[in-house]
Amino acid sequence: MPETITLEVQRYRPEDEAEPVFERFDVPFRADWMVLDALNYIKDNLDGTLSYRWACRMGVCGSCGMMVNGQPLLTCATYLERLLPGPIRVEPLKGFPVIRDLVGDITDFLEKLSRVKPWIVREEEKPLAEGEYLQTPEQLADYEQYSMCINCMLCYAACPIYELEPDFIGPAAIAIAQRYNLDSRDEGVQERLDVLSQHDGIWACTFVGECSVVCPKNVDPAGAIQRYKVAATADWFKSVLTPWANR
Amino acid sequence: MRRSREPFLWALFSGGGMASALLLPAIAFLLWIAVPLGWVEGGSYETLFALVRHPLVRLVLFALISLFLFHWAHRLRYTLYDGLQLYHLNQLIAVVTYGIASFMTVVAAYILWVFA
């Protein structure tokens, strides 16, 4: 086991630099350390001005996604040991404008996420007195996988289409739309379909599948998008074959 | 409701993908390997010719061929569009790829029609 390992961290301090630069830091190597632990070591001991996002340190908050040696990864779930002998190159998530150091501007994702109405849509709420909306284990299983998404945006960094067509609504937003569509309590399918059946919705996707490869929670956004395409196509044929039934 | 063409083209693409992935290897194995090597009985020219003359078989062949063609067209379209990033030629690429598939579909229909 080596004593130390080198990190090449992308720095961008807009007040000093026109372009991002890389800075090398030697940090102690520990077998139980993640890349995030090494970044925290740098911030605590070597350079307190290093900026990056993190919160939970346990793969739940979705804040610490970065490009590690070119791969989109949760830094809190990536062992240094996996990346021996180094150096380890740490960059901000691809596809998002960099604000500072490792911090990207995620406004675009948040705007797209809100477009798919990621909440349970009801035409009419039933009165409290009638009790809760019950769900069977089977009904839960229908959408549970998609509910695991932590909005870490690794899938956006991995998606070549998002890079080429920035208007593409993107893998996580579609997977999250499916999470609500497949929920037995939800009635928002048509509203979401109106958003997602556009070209910038599901049709921009050419099923590269990298989103599902990099997803740290096994959400399988690529699968969600393909299922959505089937549903949207069935809806299209229905509206063409039975024009009188259109809204 | 918008009348986007994308669901229709995608249906042809995915249908063609399923058909070519599942059926084409079986057809190729039977007709191009098993029959010529004599592994299956009844693979004579006359038998197969009579088979193809059956209206139902011709209908199935027509559906398969056109699905294969539209699968090819869609895939080539996006290979050119995203792969080579020819965004400014989007319309032209679509017209040419789906145009070739449509034309070949008509040719296939004609050949299968005159087969009877």
Image: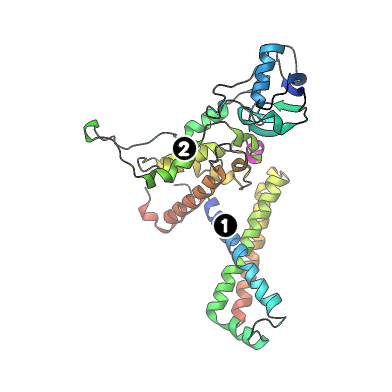
The chain letter for the residue carrying disc 2 is: A
The reply to whether dot 1 and dot 2 touch (C-beta < 8 Å) is no
- Asked if residue A163 is among those painted magenta in the image, a careful observer would answer yes
In the image, farthest residue toward the left: A129
The x, y position of residue A120, in whole percent, is 38, 35
Side of A87 relative to A105 (left or right) = right
Residue at 62% in and 64% down: B20
Name the residue beneath numbered marker 1.
B14
Image mark count: 2
Q: Which residue occupies the foreground of this view, A166 or B32?
A: B32
Q: Main secondary structure of the magenta part?
A: helix
The x, y position of residue B29, in whole percent, is 67, 73
Q: Which residue occupies the foreground of this view, A194 or A105?
A: A105
Side of B1 relative to A165 (left or right) = left
Residue at 47% in and 51% down: A231
Quadrant in the rendering for residue B14: bottom right
Q: Amino acid at mark 2?
A: Ser
Residue at 59% in and 45% down: A205
Name the residue beneath numbered marker 2.
A147
Q: Is residue A102 visible?
A: no
Dot 2 lies on which element?
helix
Q: Residues within 10 Å of mark 1 (few under 14, many from 20)?
A: some
In the image, farthest residue toward the bottom: B46
Dot 1 lies on which element?
helix
The x, y position of residue A163, in whole percent, is 66, 36
The chain letter for the residue carrying disc 1 is: B
User: Is A174 located above or below residue B29 in the figure?
Assistant: above
Residue at 60% in and 81% down: B52
Q: Amino acid at mark 1?
A: Ser
Report the span colored magenta: A161-165
Q: Residues within 10 Å of mark 2 (few under 14, many from 20)?
A: some
Q: How is the image coloured?
A: rainbow
